[in-house]
Each structure stands twice: as C-alpha cells, then as structure tokens.
Amino acid sequence: MRLKSIESAVLMLMAVTALGEGIRIIVQQATKLRALEAGGYLVLVGLLLAGMTVLYWLREPETRWEVGQGGRWVMIAILILLAYTLLMPVLGYLLSTVLALVVYLRIFGKYRWTFILGFSCVVSIGSAWLWDWLAIMLPTGPLPWP
Amino acid sequence: MEMFLAGILSALTPQNLLYAFAGCLIGTFVGVLPGIGPVSAVAILFPFTTYLPPTGMIIALAAIYYGAMYGGSTTAILMNVPGEISAVVTALDGYEMTKKGRPGPALAIAAIVSFMAGIIGATLIAMLGPSVARLALMFGPAEYLGLGLFSLTAITGLSGKSPVRGVIVMLVGLLLTSVGYDDSADFGRLTFGSNDLLLGFDIVPVMIGLFGIGEMLRVYEEKTGQFATYVLGKLMPNREELRDGLAAGMRATAISFPLGLLPGMLPSVASFLCYSFEKQRSKNPEKFGKGAIEGVAAPEAANNAAAMANLLPLLTLGIPTGPTMALILAALTVYGMIPGPLLFTQHANFTWTVIGSFFVANVILLILNLPLVGLWARLATIPQPILAPTVLILCLVGSFSTRSSMFDVWVCLIFGLLGWAATKAGWPLAPMVLAYVLGPMIERSARQVFALSPVLLLHRPIFWGFMVMGVLTIWFTRRLWRAAA
C-alpha cells in the first residue's frame, strides 16, 4: 500500500502543478496571443494525468519493489556517480574520472592497486584525448588539458 | 529505380562505407556486451554521431542498431547471455545447439536469415517508401494531430501488462516536453524562474539516462553467471538445417515486416510471436527448446524484418514506432530533416543513400559476424567492474556534449535513477520516449487546429481514419501481447 500511495501522491503533485501552471498562464499572460493555447494544453494534460492517477489508485494492483541482492551495490554506484558529477566542474574531467574509476574498480572489482591506477589513467587520458579530438569542451579544472 | 540505384552507389562511396562499417562494428561490439541492448547502444552513442555529416549520422545510427541486434544474438547462442530482449528467444534453442556441439551452424543460420530478412525489408522500404510519403502531401494540422494521436496508441504495445501505467508514463512524457520556453507564446512554462529549465529537457540526456545509466544500474544489481565452455567447430549448417532454417526465416519475415509497421510493435515482440508460430505449426513441437534450427532462425529473421519495417513509418510519416526510432527521428531533426514526402523530394539523395546503406550494412554484418564470432564471444567476458563504470562515464560525457552544460549531466543522472527505480517498480519507460518525441508535434498541431476551428476536425476524413486505426491498433496489439504471453 505504501509504495502505491507514494507513487500516486507524486503523480497527483505533478498533475496539480501542471494544472496550476496552466491556469496561471491563462490568467496572468492573458494579453499574450497564444496564452490560452499554451496554458490550455497544460490544463488538459494535468487533468488527464490526475484522472489516470485516480484510476491507477483505484484499479491497479499494489506495486512490488523488486530489488535483487545487488541493491546495496546500486546505492554505492549512485553515490559514486553523484560525487563524480559534483566534482567534475571543480577538479575537471581528467582528475575526476581517474578518481571515479579508481573508486569503482576498488569497491566493485577488488583488483590490485597497480592495475587500478594504470587502467584508470589509461582510460581517463585516452577518453580525454578522444573528447578533445571531437571538440567536446569538458571542464578542465586546475589542469590545462583537455 | 534510378534513385534507388543511385542510393546504393552513394552508400558505397568510401566515406559512407566507412560510417556503415564503423557503425556495424561498434554496434556489434556493444551488442555483444551483456546489459547493453540496441536501444541503450543507440542512446549512448547518439551524441557522438552528431559530429558526422547528416547522411553519415543516420547511416551510423542505423548500423549501430542492427549491429547491436546481431551482437546480442551471438552471446545468446554461445553463452546463454542474451545481449538484448529479442535474443532471449534465440537463446532458447541456440544455446541448446551449442551444448550439443553445434554452435557454428546456429550462428551461421542466425546470420544468414538475419541478412535475408534485412535485404527483403530494405527492398520493401525502397519500393513502398515514396508512395507512402506522397500520402503525407495531403496532411494539414488536423491530419498531423490524428497521426500523432494514432502514434501514441503505440503505448499499448509498449506498456507491457498495464496500459494504465503506460498512459500515465506517456502523460508524464508530454508534460516534460512542455517545460521550457514556448516560442509561439513568448514565455516560459514550468520553469519556476530557472534559466536552466527555460532551455527545457533535451531528449538526448533523458534517453541516455533512462536507457544507459538505468541499464548499468540494473547490471550492478544482477549476479554474473558462469559461462559454459564451447568449441566453435564447423560454421556451416548441413543441407537439412539450411533448408529448414531458411524456410522458417522466410515465414518469420513475411509475418514480422507488416507487424513492424505498427506503432509499438518492437522487434522483440515480433521475435516472440514468430517463435510461438513456428512451434505451433511444427509437426514436432517437442523439439523446440532442445536445439531446433527453426527456433533460432524464426526469432532472428523476425527481429531484423521488424526492425527494418520500423524505418518505413519513420522516414515517410515521421512516426517513431519505438524508442530507437525516436532517437533516429531526433537525429533527423538535428539537421532539420522533416520525415515525409519532402525527405524523398528535397532530400532525395540523402534518403536514397540511407536506404541504400541498409543493404550495405546487412552485407557488412554478414561478413563481420561469421569470421569474427570468436572475437565477439571473448568480448562478452569483459568483467562488469570494468565495463560498467566505463559506460557510465560515457553516458555522462555524451549528455554533456549535447549543449556543453552540466545541467544536462544532472538531467541524465536523475533520469537514470528514475529509470532504474521505475523499472524496479514495474513502470514501462518506452511510452515516455514516444511521448517525448511526438509531444511537440501533437501540441503544435492541436494548437493550430484549435486556433483555426475545432469544427475543422469534423471535415477531415484522414483524421478520423487515424482515429479508427488507433482503436484497431490498441485492440490488435493487446491481443498479440496476450498471445505472446
């Protein structure tokens, strides 16, 4: 019952947000030419979503959250990804990628340090060269390249 | 006919041949890797193909898609590790043939019938494409609205067991496409004062998150299995296997190509259906699941024929019949190519070159798959701790490359988490993709219709034709799903 309640609450929140935004646009932007259409579309989608959420709540069976034994590993992987995304603008692509790969390989692979450091550096530098060649302007951080 | 031959010749130019070859090679490589299916492969590699010219981009994406399907079958047969959903059916009999010491004939038949189905499918696209595209000349806003709504009926095929969840996910997708600056109204919607949200959610980070990161998180969750050892041995099947395999392949192609034209009819669904059909019509159904050559040939031909058929509504009418086609549609719009009759008139060289490349890619895949099968099988044993973080980093960089914005990286990450969580809770993702691609067209058409007059709809028979087809599609697709289950 709990997961279905949470899902329904989130969906209803989205529906109400869409409805509210649609009505706000229709009222506040009334002088603009396409305000009624732009707001009306949101109102329509919001109403449909609200209706379907009620139908889901009433008719659909209870949601089962099936997480395998690797659920803990998923959480760790997510945390590492989060940290990687936060650090990339600060440390730059090269350093943050080396760090992320080192942590992933150490936690999930249990390899020796020589392999971990070597693999991380090769993949990071190789990929940084590839992105540079493709003119993808990744954050550089304190380093002058890529 | 001249345009078709010109297209083949253009596809054989060194540059286009290189794109097709690279796409097939990378696609097969990615398809062999467990956990990364054709959809994920196209989503992850999509941003990097934007650096190619328009023709090269579509050739590469299509080649990646077909290559990934081939690659998925190789590991399904050799190790019972399907690289993608439609290969699950191939593994039922393919792996049994490997256990009996006949992996070579299984791989050979899979490659041969896939090639045959691909060539027949490409030929049908070349024959039917211009005629279907000419229909779109009669389209105005009402017809495009009907087309968009009809295309959304695809969610019935993509929703799995619960159409209600499919519709909800579709509506969420439509809502997400509304976020951002509304050009025609000249203000932002659902931006909450944020400059980043004013730009809206780009389709690329969303797709990479849902299908790339989400898939890798699922890989982290699953246990890895032990791979059986095998001896590759002789590749070619004997005369009886070749006869039975080709016959099953032809039947599967005949069934799957028309099915693949339907929105929502994924190649994997066609694979399951054709396997069931072969088993039911066989005089010895008990041999299925124990190494029947028809059990390998039918699903392989089915998924290739349906995958080819998926391209016809995309190129002629702009209807993406599934997530991968939605990505290819996004690729077309990157270069301002609008699917429909204009693609066959104003961009005739581009269109016929792409169609010609389908033939070329199928030949390349046949050549790549048979001699290199040993190499592909070894690649499938890359340990997950090495593979997964590499792919994750590729996903984030791919997202960043779309607009050089960290906002897109966060979007990718958040949708990756949502995609993983949604799958765990039994929510389908494909309807969101479909809604994401079709949403702008549907909204634009609906607004044009209501700006002119809603009464206009009463006088547009093509619109009502799409509505009737939509109802029939919902009914038919749900019946097919129940039959496949």
Image (cartoon, rainbow, N blue to C red):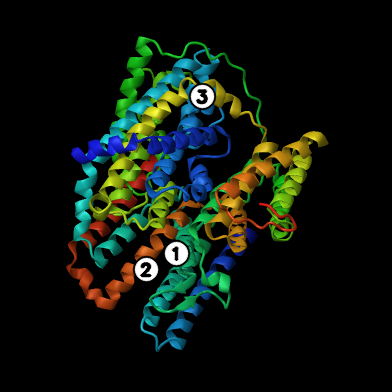
Q: Which mark is residue B77?
A: 3
Front residue of this view, candidates B111 and B256: B111
> Local crowd at mark 3 within 10 Å, few (<14), some, or many (≥20)?
many
Determine whether, in the image, residue B212 is placed left or right of residue B49.
Answer: right
Alpha carbon separation for disc pair 3 and 2: 45 Å
Q: Name the residue at 36% across, 58% down.
A: B336
Of callouts 3 and 2, the N-terminal one: 3
How far is the residue under mark 1 from the one under mark 3?
39 Å
- Kind of residue sitting beneath label 3: Ile
Residue extending furthest toward the right: A113
- Per the image, label 1 sits on a secondary structure element best described as helix
Residue B296 position within the rendered picture, expressed as x and y whole percent measured from the top left? 43, 24
Respond whether the residues carrying marks 1 and 2 are from the same subunit: yes
Q: Please say if the residues under marks 1 and 2 sit with CB atoms less than 8 Å apart.
A: yes
Q: Chain of mark 2?
A: B
Q: Is residue B427 left or right of residue A142?
A: left
Q: Residue at x 54, y 60 (%)?
A: B403
Q: Tell me the number on the disc at residue B443.
A: 2
Tell which subunit mark 3 falls on.
B
Count up the numbered dots. 3
Q: Nearer the viewer, residue B352 or A44?
A: B352
Question: Dot 2 lies on which element?
Answer: helix
- Disc with the residue nearer the chain's start (1 vs 3): 3
Residue B127 horizontal side relative to residue B20, left or right: left
Name the amino acid, label 1. Leu
Q: Indicate the position of residue B450 as horizontal and vertical percent values.
A: 29, 75
Q: Which mark is residue B322?
A: none
Closer to the camera, B38 or A139? A139
Q: Quick check: B371 above or below B467?
A: above
What amino acid type is highlighted by mark number 2?
Glu
Residue A116 location, x and y as percent? 77, 38
Q: Which mark is residue B174?
A: 1
